[in-house]
Image (tube, helix red, strand yellow):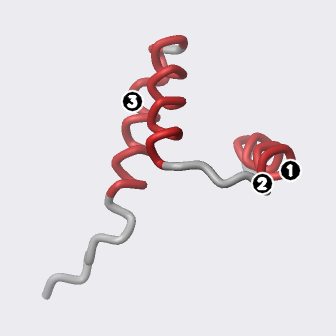
């Protein structure tokens, strides 16, 4: 188990039943980066990954 899995498990156990919009998530990510600018790059990478998750990567 990775260290980050504990945070993911806490999120799931505390808020796993909630339904949120991507707008809500984007606002929370912006607030997090404003408060923790050293995490700008990993949050940016996560946001881009989530945004492109359904893109077709098998272009032959």
Front residue of 14/2: it is 14
Tell whether label 3 touches label 1 (CB within 8 Å).
no
Residue 41, image x, y percentages? 39, 30
- The residue that disc 1 covers is 13
Tell me the element at label 1: helix
- Sequence order check, earlier mark of 1 and 3: 1
Among the 4 quarters of the image, the one containing residue 53: bottom left
Q: Nearer the viewer, mark 2 or mark 3?
A: 2
For the point 36% across and 71% down, the residue is 54
Residue 32, image x, y percentages? 54, 22
- The residue that disc 2 covers is 16
- The residue that disc 3 covers is 41
Residue 28, image x, y percentages? 54, 30
Tell me the element at label 3: helix
**Residue located farthest toward the bottom when viewing the structure as drawn:** 60
Front residue of 15/57: it is 15
Front residue of 15/52: it is 15
Tell whether label 2 touches label 1 (CB within 8 Å).
yes
**Residue located farthest toward the right when viewing the structure as drawn:** 13
Local packing at callout 3 (Cα closer than 10 Å; few below 14, some 14-19, many 20+) is few
Is residue 40 shown above or below 26? above
Q: Nearer the viewer, mark 1 or mark 3?
A: 1
Residue 36, image x, y percentages? 53, 14
């Amino acid at each position: 188990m990775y260290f980050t899995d504990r945070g993911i498990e806490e999120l799931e156990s505390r808020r796993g039943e909630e339904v949120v919009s991507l707008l809500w998530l984007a606002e929370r990510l912006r607030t997090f980066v404003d408060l923790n600018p050293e995490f700008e790059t990993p949050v940016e990478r996560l946001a881009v990954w989530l945004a492109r998750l359904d893109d077709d990567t098998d272009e032959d």
